[in-house]
């Protein structure tokens, strides 16, 4: 099949592109604006494949989106392009409204134009797959899980913009008959993760001998999924999922933030001990919390497991070990990013 991936130079998008080129016969067009979060070096291992192409463009740019679709003639569009960092959405929500909502609307409009002109068989097999987050469901107390029927209750500008885009996708399915799929996934981690997000930020700060800033009391809980498990789920959903359905994707790996940071320190203590023989945990410092910080997210992934036979392959422990190993072995990848951007700076205090 011909798969158009938006946001294919980002963290999850690049993992999906690498996975499809390395493990399938699909052809891939990566359509990405290359914002601060997009890095073509994440695609170096697959960029010379004859089944891979790249087009730089903005999902809000109707002409560029239309041209990419007409030129590539996709069988599937997987939509990952987004502004993705909650802290940035507190300081500057405008870009989130633009890319996540207007961009999704633009992509849906041009997709519908294209889809309506396909023959009957290709119309039937076409899929528009929107990649979303569990953050649209709000925050949980100590118990319970998000299921596909949990009501939406987004609380940050980021999650509100993603919730909006999920509703638009659903509306294009119901109203216009476009074969749409939505997946809502928990926190991803793994190789090529931009070093502003918790796990890679802690690794690079630990190695730099800097304080490890844990928000609030470190007790907020997230469910963590290794990115390669997520992209296997995405392929399963656009190949076998039922149009109009949504699927929750999660790792059944709930951890408090402080436990995540401790696990990173333990892995680093083993792989690259500090010169003074002390643990990297000495560098942990508690800093003011994120405003509106959701307390707990937890995913019930039983639907994708029973209906599409998907399970994560990594445990949190094996995934963290792989991730820390990757950051130790790929310092050039993140060193370049830290030099070129202000990735590691504290954001989102809402002042
Ligand atoms: P990311 O920030 O690493 O990458 C986003 C990519 O989109 C970048 O390559 C960027 O250049 C591109 N992009 C941004 N604005 C664009 C625009 N206007 N036009 C075209 N390209 C644009 O994000 P990620 O972590 O890889 O997340 C990918 C998707 O998955 C997002 O939609 C996000 O909401 C969703 N998601 C992420 C997680 C997670 O833990 N990272 C969890 C669940 C869902």
Image (tube, grey):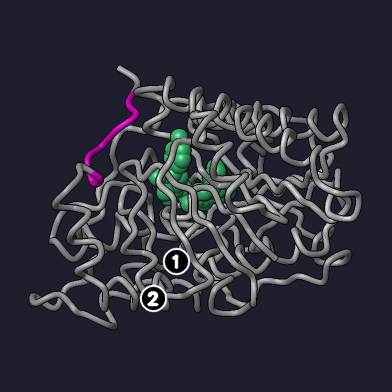
Segment colored magenta: 343-349
- Label 1–label 2 contact, CB within 8 A: no
Task: Pick whichever, 351 or 334, lies toward us.
Answer: 334
> Is residue 348 highlighted in magenta?
yes
Q: Is residue 84 visible?
A: no
Task: Pick whichever, 299 or 221, lies toward us.
Answer: 299
Real-space Cα distance between discs 1 and 2? 16 Å
Q: Is residue 30 visible?
A: yes
Count residues near mark 2 (Cα–Cα under 10 Å), then give few for <14, some for 14-19, many for 20+: few
Residue visible at 67% across and 60% down in the picture: 234
| Residue located beneath label 1 in the image | 190
Task: Name the residue furthest left.
Answer: 276
Judge left or right: residue 151 versus residue 12.
Answer: right
Quadrant assignment for the N terminus: bottom right
> Is residue 224 highlighted in magenta?
no
Say which quarter of the image contains residue 112: top right
Task: Pick whichever, 234 or 146, lies toward us.
Answer: 234
Residue 170 locus on image (x, y percent): 79, 33
Kindly identify which numbered label has been placed on residue 45: 2
Residue 319 locus on image (x, y percent): 49, 73
Measured along the vertical axis of the image, is residue 125 above or below residue 191? above
Residue 35 locus on image (x, y percent): 34, 41
């Amino acid at each position: 099949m011909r798969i158009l991936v938006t946001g294919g130079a980002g963290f999850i998008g690049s993992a999906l592109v690498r996975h499809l080129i390395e493990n399938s016969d699909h052809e891939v067009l990566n359509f990405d604006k290359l914002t601060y979060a997009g890095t073509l070096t994440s695609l170096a291992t697959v960029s010379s494949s004859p089944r891979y192409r790249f087009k730089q463009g903005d999902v809000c740019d109707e002409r560029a989106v239309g041209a990419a679709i007409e030129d590539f003639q996709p069988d599937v569009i997987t939509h990952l392009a987004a502004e993705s960092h909650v802290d940035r959405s507190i300081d500057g929500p405008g870009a989130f409204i633009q890319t996540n909502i207007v961009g999704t609307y633009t992509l849906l409009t041009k997709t519908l134009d294209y889809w309506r002109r396909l023959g009957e068989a290709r119309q039937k097999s076409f899929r528009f797959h929107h990649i979303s987050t569990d953050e649209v469901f709000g925050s949980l107390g100590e118990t319970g899980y998000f299921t596909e029927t949990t009501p939406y209750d987004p609380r940050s500008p980021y999650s509100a913009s993603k919730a909006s885009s999920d509703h638009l996708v659903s509306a294009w399915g119901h109203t216009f008959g476009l074969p749409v799929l939505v997946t809502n996934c928990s926190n991803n981690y793994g190789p090529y993760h931009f070093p502003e997000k918790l796990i890679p930020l802690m690794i690079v700060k630990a190695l730099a001998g800097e304080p490890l800033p844990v928000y609030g009391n470190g007790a907020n809980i997230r469910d963590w999924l290794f990115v390669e498990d997520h992209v296997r789920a995405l392929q399963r959903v656009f190949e076998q999922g039922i149009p109009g359905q949504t699927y929750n994707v999660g790792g059944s790996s709930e951890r408090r933030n402080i436990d995540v940071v401790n696990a990173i320190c333990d892995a680093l203590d083993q792989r690259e001990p500090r010169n003074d023989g002390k643990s990297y945990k000495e560098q942990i410092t508690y800093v003011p919390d994120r405003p509106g910080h959701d307390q707990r997210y937890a995913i019930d992934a039983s639907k994708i497991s029973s209906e599409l036979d998907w399970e994560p392959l990594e445990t949190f422990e094996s995934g963290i070990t792989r991730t820390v190993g990757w950051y130790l072995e790929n310092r050039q990848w993140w060193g370049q990013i830290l030099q070129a951007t202000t990735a590691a700076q504290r954001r989102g205090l809402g002042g």
